Image (cartoon, rainbow, N blue to C red):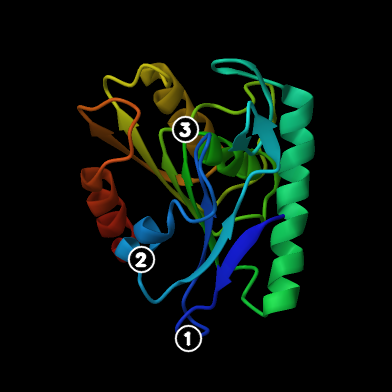
Amino acid sequence: MKHIYNPPADASKPTFLLLHGTGGTETDLLPAAGHIDPEAGVLSVRGNVSENGMPRFFKRLSEGVFDMEDLRERTEELHQFIGQAADEYGFDRNNVIALGYSNGANIAANLLFSYEDSLKSAILHHPMVPDRNKELPNLDGTRVFIAAGTNDPICPKEESEDLEKLLSGAGAEVSLHWENNGHQLTMDELVAAKAWYEKG
């Protein structure tokens, strides 16, 4: 997968897995990661799916309707890629924190839904529930921050609330943060994410 890797300042620091929104690239979330922790490593990945020339992490059938088979395959592909990158670059596979926005947040959420050991924690900006029929693994000890907009036209309020319930039900420690905004990723959200991260 096309990506950027920057090592952490020291081995104790996590590696942020950066996952952009539809039409984004692997450079989009570098400033966000730098704001939250400039000393953390980054593994920033470009989605392997193209929708009318716009990179995405998995196919969709229409707005808000996921291609579930492709979501499963792409999630497995990303999970394997993180492991391969950890071997290649030598970062701690057990200290990976996803930072995803929109489509990227959705595949990050599906990593949590699919694998017990995929992520240490996750910062999800404007995610949806990836798969309502999935039995979640044990997520005890996994911290998740969800940023949502009360006026988000793409991600209804119930999506964020349901995602919080499902993750909490599997043992994750979830913080749901609301902004009176739409679907955009705002500085206020990043400030809240940084405060949440530093409490960890």
At horizontal 61% and vertical 44% (from top left) the residue drawn is 112
Q: Amino acid at mark 2?
A: Gly
At horizontal 54% and vertical 41% (from top left) the residue drawn is 104
Task: Identify which residue, 85 or 2, lies in the foreground.
Answer: 2
At horizontal 69% and vertical 27% (from top left) the residue drawn is 59
The x, y position of residue 172, in whole percent, is 50, 46
* Quadrant of the image containing the C terminus: bottom left
Q: Which residue is mark 3?
A: 127
SS category of the residue bearing label 1: loop
- Report, in whole angstroms, how far the alpha carbon at label 1 lies from the one at label 2: 15 Å
- Report, in whole angstroms, how far the alpha carbon at label 3 lies from the one at label 1: 30 Å
Dot 1: within a 10 Å radius of its alpha carbon, few (fewer than 14), some, or many (20 or more) residues? few
Specify the farthest residue to the bottom.
Answer: 10
The x, y position of residue 108, in whole percent, is 57, 44
Left/right placement of residue 59 relative to residue 40 reads right
Q: Amino acid at mark 3?
A: Pro
* Quadrant of the image containing the N terminus: bottom right
Q: Amino acid at mark 1?
A: Asp
The x, y position of residue 190, in whole percent, is 28, 50
Mark number, residue 34: 2
Quick check: can you spot residue 135? yes
